[in-house]
Amino acid sequence: MTDLAQEIAAAAARLIVEEGLDYGAAKKRAVKSLGLPARSELPANELVEDEVRAYIDLFCADTQPAELAALRELAATWMERLAAFRPHLTGAVWRGTATRLNDIHLQLYCDDSKSAELALIDRRVDYDVGATDGPRGEPVDVLTLASTSPALGQRVLIHLTILDHDDLRGALKPDSRGRPWRGDLQALRALMQKA
């Protein structure tokens, strides 16, 4: 790890916590704000996450645990509602670095990509459809809805990434430190009991 990577990671962490940016956008803005060339090598997500944790410990230790708990509770509610689609929580809410500014990211592993949309329609849930790159590089649907968190007193965006059932096999690979990038409802409940 270089000093420059550490500096970019620290600047990105501030943007992630204070503005709710995702890691990619935060790293790019950090490079720009530090006056570095746009093609500068970006730090690994694990390094950025370490800096996010350090920032939270220093500046948000009194509020972040309750905000994370509220987001995880809302995520669990939606995972229960969407249990038929094998939901897995990912992102900052799963990894424990979320604040009230973060969205919830669920990955649904479906036999039929339209079945999740039909389930939302049946529940009369309003949602928007977007796309992102899937695990094989091709675009996959992302359904975005808003749900109220009573504990936070605000609406939270929930992004449902629709993946093929077969993608679940590769999804459970850990990061370079052996920590999982995502977890199912049972794993989430275990995290919630530890906190």
Image (spheres, rainbow, N blue to C red):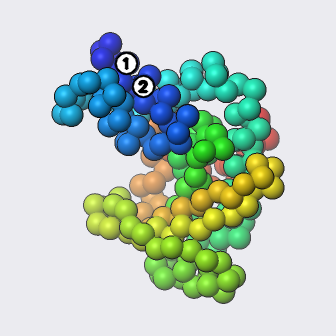
Quadrant for residue 93, please give it. Answer: top right
Q: Position of residue 151 (x, y in %)?
A: 81, 50
Q: Nearer the viewer, residue 134 or 35?
A: 35
Q: Nearer the viewer, residue 95 or 129?
A: 129
Q: Residue at x 60, y 59 (%)?
A: 157
Q: Quadrant of the C terminus?
A: top right
Q: Position of residue 124 (x, y in %)?
A: 67, 83
Is the residue under label 2 in contact with that under label 1 (CB below 8 Å)?
yes
Q: Residue at x 42, y 69 (%)?
A: 130
Amino acid under disc 2:
Ala
- Can I make out residue 92 in this image? yes
Q: Nearer the viewer, residue 75 or 63?
A: 63
Q: Say above or below: 6 vs 76.
A: above
* Label 1 CA crowd tier, 10 Å (few <14, some 14–19, many 20+): some
Amino acid under disc 1:
Glu
Horizontal side of residue 165 vs 127, given as left or right: left
Q: Residue at x 70, y 25 (%)?
A: 61
Q: Which residue is mark 1?
A: 7
Secondary-structure class at tag 1: helix
Q: Which residue is mark 2?
A: 11
Q: Position of residue 156 (x, y in %)?
A: 65, 57
